[in-house]
Structures are given as structure tokens and as C-alpha cells.
Image (cartoon, rainbow, N blue to C red):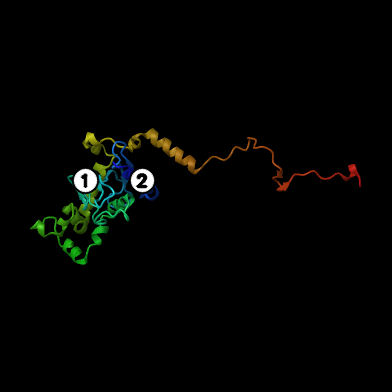
């Protein structure tokens, strides 16, 4: 990796810390600065409650016109996710990378948008494309004639437009089986990729959760200050809010 590229990656990470989208946390890999790993916690939409593994692969010649690549867990059901690889397409927002305009935090904001509002980019297509998509079927006679084939996952694209209930069920399955907290996901993870910079294992520990709740409650309602401790001398009478002072004694000194 070139020295200039290293400085640019540090700058990108600092920008990300300033502009990171809510619910997404990533860190550069200690062995490979071009691989950023993290989690995305989805708080609204079809995937609400899911906490998913997230990988951001930065091109080796960054910054060039090649797009960074984003990966979710394999099998993730979404119109823009290739199920076999888990790669999330970002071409709906970036036709090519423009180093003078684009930053990595832009990519993560787009990822968050796609997960909370999967239909947002579909709605940005032309009226003709929308019309074709709504006429498609999950069992087309000729798949090549279906506009859904323009998406990495044609079936997901069709379901989210034409069969929302079925899509919602598939999305909930993703939450229950592919979330980092899911036992089924941990059992099926590739051991070579099971080195994650962020751990959420503590959610299953009742003692850990109890301590966390007590700490949050304490921070929300701090105890009153201990007035029994001396804070030094005060030159103000707290009952009248007047400054203590010695009155001149004219009887002692007399008039000069």
C-alpha cells in the first residue's frame, strides 16, 4: 500500500467518525487496511432488530473509479444483495467512484438506506420500469422478460413490489437466522471469517445485562451530592445571599 493511500484511508476513517450513520460501526482490519469490518444494527423497516455482519472491501488502487464492495452475510434476502456471495450492490447510488466527490461514509449511509427502506431505490426508477416490475411474477414464463432480472436478487425485487407479505416473512427469517446474536448464524459462519473486531456476545449474559442497565439508570439519575463533606469556607450567607463582612466599630476607635 502506498504511503499516500495510507494517509487517504486515515482521512476517510476520520471523516467516517464525524459522519457515520446511526447503527453502523466499522473498523479497519489490523492486517489489511483495505478491509473494514463491522456491524449494522437495523432499527426500522423489514429487518428491524437485526444486527448483521458488515464488510467493506476497498479497491487496491483506491482512490480510483472502482467502487468499494459491500458484503452482508451469505443468503441475505434483499433485492440488491447477491444471495450466494452476500455482496450488496451500491450501483443504484454510485455509477462509478468519483474521488473528488465520494467518501466511504457516503457508502455506509447508502447501505443503511437500503436496509431500512429497500424500496427507496426501486421507486427512483422510471415510471416505465416500475410498470414492468409490478407486472412481473415470481414465476415468470420467461425470466429474461422480467425487469426483476436487473436486480442482484430478482426474486426479492419481485416479492417486495408484488408480494409484500411474503417478502416480510423472508426478511424476518434473515433477522432470526443471520443476525450476529443468532445461534444458527454462529454455527454456520466460515471459521476463516470468524475474526470480528466487534463482539456482542454479552447480550446473552444476564449478569452483563443487569450491570449495563444499572449503569444506565445511574447515569440517568445521578445520586444527590453529599452535603456532609466540607467544601471549604464560604464568604456568602446562604440564607440571605449577602457577603459576610465585619461592621466597623465606631465606639472602639472613636471619631477622628
Mark 1 or mark 2: which comes first in sequence? Answer: 2
Say the numbered circle drawn on residue 86.
1
Callout 2 crowding tier (Cα within 10 Å): few <14, some 14–19, many ≥20: many
Could you tell me residue 16's position as x and y percent?
36, 48
Q: Nearer the viewer, residue 28 or 38?
A: 28
Report the Cα–Cα distance between label 1 and label 2.
Answer: 24 Å
Please, what secondary structure does the residue beneath circle 1 have? Answer: loop
Q: How many marks?
A: 2
Front-most of residues 219 and 214: 219
Q: Residue at x 42, y 38 (%)?
A: 212
Question: As rendered, which of 106 and 226 lies closer to the eye?
Answer: 106
Task: For the N terminus, give its image quadrant.
Answer: top left
Q: Position of residue 27 (x, y in %)?
A: 33, 41
Which residue is situated farthest in the bottom direction here? 127
Residue at image location 73% in from the left, 46% down from the top: 243
Residue position for label 2: 13
The relative height of residue 44 versus residue 210 in the rendered view (above or below) is below
Q: Which residue does the image show at 19% across and 44% down from the upper left?
A: 85
Q: Nearer the viewer, mark 1 or mark 2?
A: 2
The furthest residue to the left:
141
Say left or right for 161 vs 139.
right
Q: Quadrant of residue 38?
A: top left
Q: Are marks 1 and 2 in contact (CB under 8 Å)?
A: no
Examine the rendered structure and indicate whether residue 199 appears above or below residue 143. above
Secondary structure at badge 2 equals helix
Q: Locate residue 48, reporting x and y percent.
A: 30, 49
Q: Which percent across, then down, holds residue 166?
A: 20, 53
Amino acid at each position: 500500500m502506498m504511503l499516500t493511500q495510507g494517509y487517504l484511508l486515515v482521512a476517510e476513517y476520520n471523516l467516517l467518525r464525524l459522519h457515520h450513520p446511526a447503527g453502523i460501526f466499522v473498523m479497519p482490519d489490523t492486517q489489511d487496511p483495505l478491509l473494514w469490518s463491522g456491524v449494522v444494527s437495523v432499527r426500522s423497516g423489514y429487518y428491524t432488530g437485526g444486527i448483521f455482519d458488515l464488510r467493506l472491501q476497498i479497491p487496491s488502487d483506491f482512490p480510483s473509479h472502482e467502487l468499494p464492495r459491500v458484503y452482508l452475510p451469505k443468503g441475505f434476502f434483499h433485492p440488491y444483495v447477491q444471495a450466494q456471495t452476500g455482496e450488496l450492490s451500491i450501483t443504484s447510488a454510485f455509477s462509478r467512484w468519483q474521488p473528488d466527490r465520494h467518501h466511504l461514509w457516503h457508502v455506509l449511509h447508502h447501505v443503511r438506506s437500503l436496509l431500512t427502506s429497500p424500496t427507496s431505490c426501486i421507486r427512483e426508477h422510471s415510471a416505465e420500469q416500475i410498470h414492468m416490475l409490478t407486472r412481473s411474477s415470481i414465476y415468470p414464463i420467461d425470466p429474461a422478460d422480467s425487469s426483476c432480472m436487473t436486480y442482484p436478487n430478482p426474486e426479492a425485487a419481485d416479492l417486495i413490489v408484488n408480494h409484500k407479505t411474503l417478502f416480510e416473512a423472508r426478511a424476518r427469517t434473515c433477522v432470526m437466522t443471520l443476525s450476529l446474536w443468532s445461534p444458527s448464524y454462529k454455527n454456520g459462519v466460515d471459521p476463516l471469517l470468524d475474526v470480528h473486531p466487534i463482539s456482542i456476545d454479552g447480550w446473552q449474559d444476564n449478569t452483563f445485562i443487569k450491570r449495563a442497565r444499572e449503569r444506565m439508570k445511574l447515569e440517568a439519575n445521578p445520586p444527590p451530592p453529599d452535603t456532609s463533606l466540607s467544601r471549604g469556607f464560604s464568604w456568602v450567607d446562604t440564607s440571605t445571599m449577602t457577603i459576610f463582612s465585619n461592621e466597623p466599630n465606631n465606639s472602639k476607635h472613636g471619631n477622628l
